[in-house]
């Protein structure tokens, strides 16, 4: 049997490879870069280990499920450590809010910020659970290939007021502006503007309350390595340094790929974890596309991009939480600059990640490791990052010195950064979008890239830009959808049992 080829080894691609192998398919994963992981790559520098991309693990059962599908015990492969608080939200006035899963702790903090918002929060949380029960439990792993799939849920979406933005819905219940920001920043973690992202994404609040927030021992890269290891055990090769140049189409169906080195690899089907906008415009000849044309793709709205600085310090900042949201003086105005005006603002809001708070082994003894993330406009902005990147990083560090990290610039022993050029060039994401398509109302569910191509038979998609969307639960569920839209092989290949060696 010809293998199913998975293009890209991000979490969506690796999860898809596991599920396809569990279905009985032979699978081959092709990765353009030198290391598996896609956005979840790892940077190693001067004894520090930095996760390049996702650092927040939610819905951990989705990872566990991948290993149990192959007859493995997840505990033999990785360890997830709970993070508390989930996030510490820091405001310009010096106040802080610890975003946690325990309702009593949340309510006590709300009472200190704004006693009148306690009842409103309880009603908002109940609404979040109601949205979660529909938007996640019932729909996250359901295909949306046909318009009829969308039409069936329209009445329920109208009842849940999915026409409202996350910010508008939260504002219906919460009046304190600081608390509104606490409960609306989450769409930014999946590439969305809280003022434009549909309120169905309020389900993130209940998802985190229900299952918690975790960090893998050894960093997020340890999860990638665990998946590559279990795939190797069941006969799935992950070939790195193998960029795909073309998807081969014959008689309207994908029959294989051609790599940049000119190698042809035949396939039973092709699953792309790469950016669909790039795949269609660069890897699939226009004569095979009548729905996803260059013109229709150009009309799509990419998410914002990111500037991410990585740095290690001599000594520890014990008062800095594992995850900190450092909010700036503006909220809506800054988001307008990023998403609509596409200008590089003088101020910023930041996500500060201190993994050594949970796992000191990620830095040399006596040191702390950090990454600081700033949402910035995508490459449609025309910003000259060659000129702006270094000064921008310097301004971010100045801000951190003033917001809880005194003397940080003098204590840095190593640093590096990535900007929208990294997402565009290294990760081959159109316009340098960090999260694929922006999750607005007209780019969600049926309006998002379909998991099964409308243009080419046996061509499928998983990952951030396909249904259901970005974020680790989203990309892992996109692999679940594949099980429902792809047929099982006529003669499945059994998954080998794991060989246990007596100690």
Image (spheres, rainbow, N blue to C red):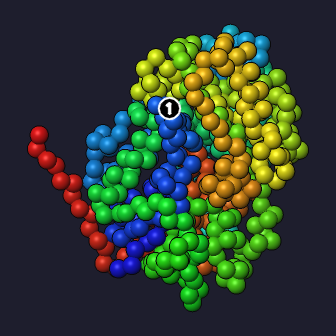
Q: Relative to 229, does residue 292 appear above or below in the rendering? A: below
Q: Relative to 475, does residue 332 appear above or below in the rendering? A: above
**Residue 166 at x, y = what percent?**
73, 39
Q: Residue at x 44, y 24 (%)?
A: 364
Q: Residue at x 71, y 35 (%)?
A: 374
Q: What secondary structure is marked by label 1?
A: loop
In the orientation shown, which residue stands out farthest toward the right? 341
Choose top left, top right, bottom left or bottom right for residue 188. top right
Q: Residue at x 82, y 46 (%)?
A: 384
In the orientation shown, which residue stands out farthest toward the bottom? 251
Q: Relative to 449, does residue 109 appear above or below in the rendering? A: above
**Residue 421 at x, y = what percent?**
71, 50
Choose top left, top right, bottom left or bottom right for residue 201. top right
Number of numbered markers: 1
**Residue 16 at x, y = what percent?**
46, 60
Q: Residue at x 21, y 54 (%)?
A: 498
Residue located beneath label 1 in the image: 46
Crowd tier of the residue under label 1, counting other residues whose Cα lies within 10 Å: few below 14, some 14–19, many 20 or above: few
Residue 41 versus residue 101: which sits nearer the camera?
41
Residue 54 versus residue 212: which sits nearer the camera?
54
In the orientation shown, which residue stands out farthest toward the left? 502
Quadrant in which the N terminus is drawn: bottom left
* Residue 456 showing in the rendered view: yes
Q: Is residue 388 left or right of residue 308?
A: right
Q: Is residue 143 left or right of residue 152?
A: left
Quadrant in which the C terminus is drawn: top left
Q: Is residue 441 left or right of residue 73?
A: right
Residue 336 versus residue 390: which sits nearer the camera?
390
């Amino acid at each position: 049997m010809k293998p199913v080829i998975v293009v890209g080894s991000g979490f969506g691609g690796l999860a898809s490879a596991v599920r396809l192998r569990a279905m009985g398919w032979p699978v081959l994963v092709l990765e353009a870069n030198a290391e598996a992981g896609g956005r979840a790559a790892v940077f190693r520098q001067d004894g520090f280990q930095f996760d390049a991309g996702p650092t927040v693990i939610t819905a951990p059962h989705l990872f566990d499920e991948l290993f149990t599908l192959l007859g493995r015990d997840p505990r033999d492969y990785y360890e997830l450590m709970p993070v508390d608080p989930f996030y510490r939200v820091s405001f310009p006035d010096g106040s802080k809010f610890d975003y946690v899963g325990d309702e009593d702790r949340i309510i006590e903090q709300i009472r200190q910020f704004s006693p009148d918002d306690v009842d409103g929060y309880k009603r908002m949380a109940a609404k979040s659970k109601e949205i979660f029960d529909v938007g996640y439990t019932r729909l996250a792993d359901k295909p949306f290939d046909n318009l009829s799939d969308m039409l069936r849920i329209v009445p329920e979406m109208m009842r849940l007021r999915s026409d409202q933005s996350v910010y508008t819905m939260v504002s219906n219940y919460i009046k304190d502006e600081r608390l509104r920001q606490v409960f609306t920043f989450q769409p930014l973690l999946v590439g969305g503007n809280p003022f434009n992202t549909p309120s169905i994404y309020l389900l993130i609040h209940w998802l985190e309350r229900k299952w918690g927030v975790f960090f893998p021992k050894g960093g997020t890269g340890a999860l990638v390595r665990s998946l590559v290891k279990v795939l190797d055990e069941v006969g799935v090769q992950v070939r790195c340094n193998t960029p795909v140049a073309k998807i081969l189409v014959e008689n309207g169906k994908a029959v294989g790929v051609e790599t940049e080195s000119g190698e042809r690899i035949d396939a039973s089907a092709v699953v792309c974890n790469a950016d669909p906008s790039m795949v269609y415009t660069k890897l699939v000849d226009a004569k095979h596309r009548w729905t996803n044309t260059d013109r229709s793709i150009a009309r799509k709205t990419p998410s914002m991009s990111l500037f991410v600085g990585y740095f290690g310090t001599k000594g520890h900042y014990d008062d800095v939480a594992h995850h900190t949201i450092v909010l700036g003086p503006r909220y809506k105005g800054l988001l307008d600059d990023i998403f609509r005006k596409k200008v590089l603002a003088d101020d910023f809001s930041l996500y500060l990640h201190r993994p050594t708070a949970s796992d000191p082994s990620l830095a040399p003894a006596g040191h702390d490791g950090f990454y600081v993330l700033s949402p910035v406009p995508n490459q449609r902005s025309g910003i000259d990052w060659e000129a702006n990147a270094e000064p921008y990083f310097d301004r971010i560090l100045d801000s951190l010195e003033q917001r809880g990290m005194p003397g940080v610039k003098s204590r840095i022993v190593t640093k590096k950064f990535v900007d929208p050029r990294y997402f565009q060039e290294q990760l081959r994401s159109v316009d340098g979008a960090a999260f694929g398509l922006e999750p607005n109302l007209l780019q969600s569910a049926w309006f998002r890239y379909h998991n099964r191509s409308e243009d080419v038979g046996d061509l499928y998609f998983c990952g951030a830009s396909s249904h259901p969307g970005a974020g680790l639960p989203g990309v892992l569920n996109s692999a679940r959808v594949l099980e429902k839209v792809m047929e099982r092989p006529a003669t499945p290949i059994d998954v080998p049992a794991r060989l246990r060696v007596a100690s």
